[in-house]
Amino acid sequence: MKVCNSCWALRGLFIAAILLLTMPAYSAKESWYTYWALGASTHSYDADIQAFKDFAQNQPGSFSNIEVASDLWGFYWPWGDSTIAGVVVSSTSDNIYKLDLNEPNNLAEFYTGFPYISGASEYVSIRQHLMAASIMHFYGDEIGSGFYVRGDAGIAILRIESDIASPVVRDEGIGVLAGIGYGLPLSEDTRLLFGLSFKYNKIGGRDYRSSVFTIGGLW
């Protein structure tokens, strides 16, 4: 009988994934935690900002749109057995760019140098940062385990950069974030968090909304 090596490999990966998800892992309660995450986002703007984005995307040539999200510099302290409270910077970036296909470029260069990369001849970048007080409550057996809810509130910062139709714009306001997710303890001091959140910023009299999915670590 001929054995399919790739079939066995796929079965092995599937079994390993099931074991990872079902293996009982327990994390020690820490005196403080740090949280970092990356993910994707979608954005909704007031009519004038949306019109500016549409104008940029309708310029002659081929434009691409990349929307990313992150949670950075998160520091939390336990508040009871199932809750942590602290501070975090929640950011989203809505990037529209036109590549000059005659210039070399790659995805890594885009992320590390945007918008100043050799292949980006025109660009628009709409970035929002929410510097907030934050709280997470877990419904599992411990902090970082099971389903959780999250709420943030703080100062929102907007920065728009473009070489198409607008100079650099910077403004400040207020913002809130509400989210849900699931925490998976991986070891005594590592927890994997899957999060889905909605963020609303009020900046310069305009409404900025974003929906975000992130995968992060709580240590």
Image: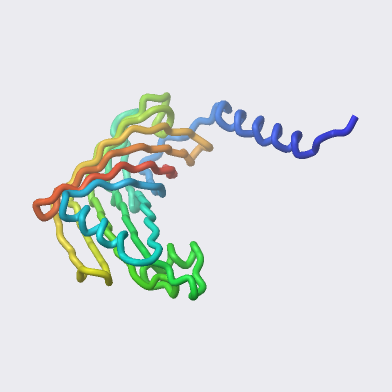
Task: Looking at the picture, tell me which residue is in the foreground, 80 or 193.
Answer: 193
Please give the count of numbered marks on the rendered protein.
Answer: 0
Task: Looking at the picture, tell me which residue is in the foreground, 33 or 71.
Answer: 71
- 212 to the left or right of 173: right
Task: Looking at the picture, tell me which residue is in the foreground, 133 or 214.
Answer: 214
Image location of residue 198, percent across then percent down: 27, 39
Q: Which quarter of the picture shows residue 64?
A: bottom left
- 205 to the left or right of 182: left
Image location of residue 215, percent across then percent down: 43, 43
Residue visible at 38% across and 55% down in the picture: 66
Residue visible at 70% across and 36% down in the picture: 10
Task: Looking at the picture, tell me which residue is in the foreground, 157 or 35.
Answer: 157
Q: Residue furthest front?
A: 60
Q: Which quarter of the picture shows residue 115?
A: bottom left
Residue visible at 60% across and 29% down in the picture: 18
- Residue 183 seen in the figure: yes
Q: How is the image coloured?
A: rainbow
Q: Quadrant of the N terminus?
A: top right
Image location of residue 57, percent across then percent down: 31, 59
In the rendered view, tell whether residue 208 sits above or below residue 81: below
Q: Quadrant of the C terminus?
A: top left
- Residue 219 seen in the figure: no
In the rendered view, tell whether residue 62 sits above or below residue 133: below
